[in-house]
Amino acid sequence: MTSGTWNLYLIAVHPLHQGKGCGGALVATLEAMLAARGERVLLVETSSLPEFERTRAFYVKHGYDEEARIREFYKAGEDKIVFRKALTAAS
């Protein structure tokens, strides 16, 4: 359906291991694999709820930009936020 655009649906790091670079390493590895294959874009989505603030900050820290917000996607008062990162061979 797309040419070079990928969706990352879910990653998670056990709370005891968060903040140690595991999530960043997972994302960096995925980005490098996709870039090496010539893929162009990686999208991720998350919730707008306050408890997902760390998740949103994680993606911003790793070079993702907020691309879209779909209001009340998950339920009333909970938006879906889509982050986007262009992939390059150096990702």
Image (cartoon, rainbow, N blue to C red):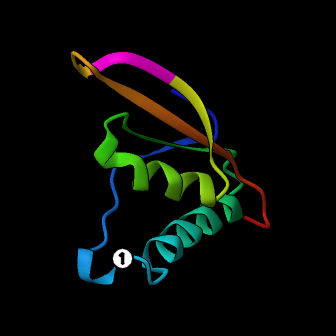
Main secondary structure of the magenta stretch: strand
Callout 1: 10 Å neighbours few (<14), some, many (20+)? few
Say which of 61 and 43 sits in front: 61
Q: Does residue 43 appear to the left or right of 88 in the view shown?
A: left
Q: Magenta segment: does it hold 68?
A: no
3 is higher (above) or lower (below) than 6? above
74 is higher (above) or lower (below) than 39? above
The structure residue drawn at horizontal position 63% and vertical position 48%, both measured from the top left corner, is 64
The structure residue drawn at horizontal position 36% and vertical position 76%, both measured from the top left corner, is 18
For the C terminus, the quadrant is bottom right
The quadrant in which residue 34 appears is bottom right
Residue 13 in percent (x, y) is at: 31, 72
Q: Amino acid at mark 1?
A: Gln
17 is higher (above) or lower (below) than 7? below
Residue 76 in percent (x, y) is at: 21, 15
What residue is shown with label 1?
18
The structure residue drawn at horizontal position 37% and vertical position 33%, both measured from the top left corner, is 48
Residue 40 in percent (x, y) is at: 69, 45
Secondary structure beneath label 1: loop
The structure residue drawn at horizontal position 47% and vertical position 48%, both measured from the top left corner, is 56
1 is higher (above) or lower (below) than 64? above
Tally of marks: 1
Which residue lies most toward the left here? 75
- What range is drawn magenta here? 69-73
